[in-house]
Amino acid sequence: MSTRHFLTLFDASPAELRGILERAIELKGMTARGEIYEPLKNRTLAMLFEKSSTRTRVSFEVGMAQFGGHALFLSPKDTQIGRGEPVEDTAVVLSSMVDVIMVRNHSHAILEEMAAHSRVPVINGLTDRFHPCQLLADMQTWWEHRGDIAGATVAWIGDGNNMCHSYINAALQFGFKLNIGCPAGYLPDADVLEKGGSSVSVMHDPRDAVSGADLIVTDVWASMGDEAEYDQRMSDFAGFIVDEALMKLAHKDALFMHCLPAHRGEEVSAEIIDGPQSVVWDEAENRLHAQKALLEFLLAPNR
Ligand code: CP
Ligand code: NVA
């Protein structure tokens, strides 16, 4: 049987994704009750981080510890991959010793190369193109607050970046309508958008995108790797802040999500992210539970 990876949300079927979310909610309850459950005893996760992280690193590491396994933090600064060892060789060697590999790097193509040469599952912990683990947490959070997201309207406000791409994939996999409100010049990649088909609409006025929406989502205007464009982006994204005036145009019980880290006063106002419609802390915590469900799905499917 070929090795199962999780590089985008299309690496699991809609039914499997729903199963992962249901299991994440069960695992969250078990953890809250203090139940010991160790399906990954003696199993090891290698985590390769080319970019910074708080949530992704901590949630994977804690998840493996709670499952009775172990997680290794590896960075290019102190491994041979940072000195030019081929990705292919790294994948072969790591997968001869560990049971699963998580990668956070700039290039999605390199992640795919890693997966192509790995004998164990490879998980995307964020690339320049996609952030599927964050979507598991976001969808779990919606499920806990509102139930099934199928048929709902989600507004993505801001950059057509890796998170936006994963929302486009999620619109298809979870059956919601996605309005993308982004400035001209910051559209999602054409191939990703095309795949979204009629589930996705692009609008250049954020007010049109949020109108009647059930969930408003945003992200930083300058992602990791975009730092040199910071000043230009701040001026290009002016008017795209999610603030009270914009939220008022959404459904009155709409929720607000942000993958974090956030910049209050840039893409979101403090009154919204710290206000009653925001579920960002649940969203962040759910990284742990959703990824535990993902690890179990990949490594211990017959638990
Ligand atoms: N949302 C997210 O991936 O956070 P980190 O960059 O802290 O991992
Ligand atoms: N779009 C952001 C997400 C951070 C979790 C970035 O890539 O930096």
Image: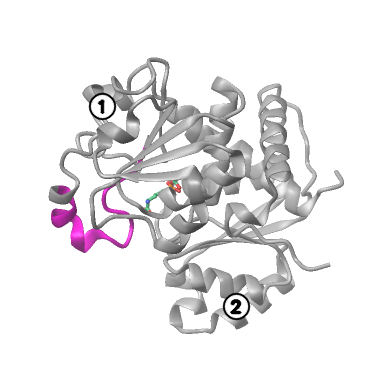
Q: Which residues are magenta?
A: 218-234
Q: On residue 90, which mark appears?
A: 2
Q: Residue furthest right?
A: 302
**Per the image, is 223 magenta?**
yes
The foreground one among 23 and 193 is 193
Q: Position of residue 290 (x, y in %)?
A: 62, 39
**Splitting the image into 4 quarters, where does residue 293 fall?**
top right
Can residue 289 be seen by looking at this rendering? yes
Q: Position of residue 265 (x, y in %)?
A: 19, 34
Q: Position of residue 171 (x, y in %)?
A: 53, 43
**Per the image, is 97 magenta?**
no
SS at badge 1: helix
Residue at x-position 27% and y-position 60%: 226
Q: Position of residue 269 (x, y in %)?
A: 24, 29
Does residue 297 appear to the left or right of 277 in the view shown?
right
Numbered circles on residues, count: 2
The foreground one among 51 and 249 is 249
SS at badge 2: helix
The foreground one among 202 and 258 is 202
Residue at x-position 31% and y-position 62%: 225
Residue under label 1, please give it: 246
